Image: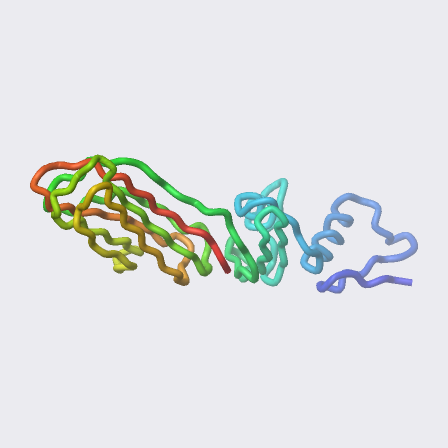
Amino acid sequence: MATVYGPDKYVTPTGPDAPDVPATIITLLDSMRPSLIGHASSIADRTAKYGRASSSSIQAPAGTVVVSAELNAIWVKTSDTLDEWSTIVQHSDIVSTRGTDTINSDMWTEVRKLTIPETGTYSLFAYASEENGSEDGKIREFKVGIGAMYGFGGSSPASWYWRWTGSRTISLKKGDQLTFSIQQRSGVARPIISELAYQRIL
């Protein structure tokens, strides 16, 4: 008696027509695959295994569920032909970039930049300080951009070892560019420490 498998209703023949060649077995596996939950250790691993067709992977159909214990994530594929996913749950480690830059007076200088890897809700953080004993009282200005949009920012007069921090929680799309720019008005170039960070929270 024939048995039906998978969402494509693949029927295994009986008798002399029973599957006995690799191609038939592969057809059976591909038919069953969308009903299985896939596993990926990272976004790159998810793409390699389920996001594109190759000799070692498949172009998984829309509706495929992939789980990642490493990223605390669950994704559902939203396209039959593209590497596009909807995130059900995902929490990430903090991703940050930090350094010291010489900022010329009276002009905006972009000091940090990050790219959002996946669509979701993120907590953003920016930090700046001038730990060189400057106490000129002149304004230091800060802005975090999300693409061409102003995200958040602020200003601070330069006191002894001044520090500034800012943060925001916002929904972002895959590929969004985060930039952190600083302007200072002391009249001379000054070294300023800065950090830009994000953490995926949903």
List the single residue furthest toward the left.
Answer: 187
Above/below status of 9 relative to 125:
below
- 44 displayed left or right of 58: left
Q: Quadrant of the N terminus?
A: bottom right
- Image point 23% across, 51% down: which residue? 142
For the residue pair 180 and 191, the one nearer the viewer reads as: 191
- Which percent across, then down, holds residue 110? 23, 44
Residue at 29% of width from left, 49% of height from top? Answer: 179
Q: How is the image coloured?
A: rainbow
**Which quadrant would residue 60 be assigned to in this image?**
bottom right
Number of marks present in the image shown:
0
The picture quadrant where one finds residue 161 is top left
- Residue 8, image quadrant: bottom right
Specify the farthest residue to the front.
160
Task: Give the camera-side residue of 142 and 112.
Answer: 142
Residue at (31, 47) in percent of width and height? 127
